[in-house]
Image (cartoon, rainbow, N blue to C red):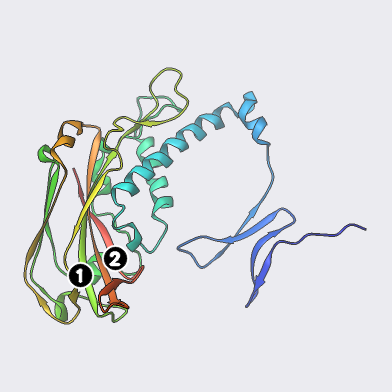
Amino acid sequence: MGTTTIMAIIKPPFEIVGSIRGVSFYKQYGSDKIIMRTKGGATKQKIKNSPKFAQLRLHQTEWGGCVKMSRAICSAMWRVIPLADFNVSANMNGFAKKLQALDTEMSVGERRILLSKNKYLLDGFQLNRIHTFASILRIAPFWEIKRETLEARVEIPYINTDIHLVNPNNLPFFRIVVSLGCASDMVREEAGRKEYLPMNGNINGFVNSKCTEWFSTNRQIQAQELIINYDEQYIPKLTDDISMILSIGVEFGKQGFNNQPVEVKRAGCAKVLGVK
């Protein structure tokens, strides 16, 4: 008599993680629920070659472009991504799919993903669902992006931490970080091209950042300015199909082993200030 291999693990109180007879149980970051998924379906070979799956292959190709667009956007926000409290990559995959659906000129399988034509859709994007940026830091930074010089400026007003800062975890330090990144549109227009590629790969995914010094969460902080810029050699590489994404975040810290502040992971918040 054969043996049955069970790969699932039962955790108290009665949570199942793993696989049992073609059914997988798993958790996804940002959710406390157990997700159940059945295995099976057509083979990879059949999906790749059968005429019945021609339309599916077109959508798969488009989805590959969406994933690349998502990676470009996340790379442009790389410095503040760790402050998110949900899976930003998965969210951006869906966002890129919505951008793709806005292209009514190209046929399915070749629809472009043009962030540069729809920048406003990413303005103000929040990287937190529990404690948003505005609920943590109750000020309104002034910002501007200068495409002609590949730079951004963020003015942070006076902060009285008793009034303007909410500290959910009662940590002793905080600082403000800003980042300026570049994300290219994705296209599949060349004849014979099998995948989506950035229209401008020269600076796609580039990101620069600046941050303030660590401050006590129990003090008053004078207004300050943070300026981010790129080397002049990259200015000629900036084309109309590149979107410049300016983000801001609040990091909280604790005292480290050397008595210097160190960041506490996932204790802060962040958002997109604007896209130009």
Residue at numbered disc 2: 269
Residue 176, percent from left and from top: 20, 65
Chain-order first, disc 1 or disc 2:
1
Give the residue displayed 16% in from the left and 81% down from the top.
Answer: 162
Up/down of 265 relative to 275, above or below: below
Residue found at the far right of this picture: 1
Amino acid type at image mark 2: Cys
Q: Quadrant of residue 5?
A: bottom right
Up/down of 197 relative to 128, above or below: above
Give the residue displayed 7% in from the left and 70% down from the top.
Answer: 158
User: Between 108 and 44, which is closer to the camera in this rendering?
Assistant: 44
Residue at numbered disc 1: 137
Disc 2 secondary structure class? strand
User: Between 53 and 220, which is closer to the camera in this rendering?
Assistant: 220
Residue 94 lies left or right of residue 56; in this view the side is left
Disc 1 secondary structure class? loop
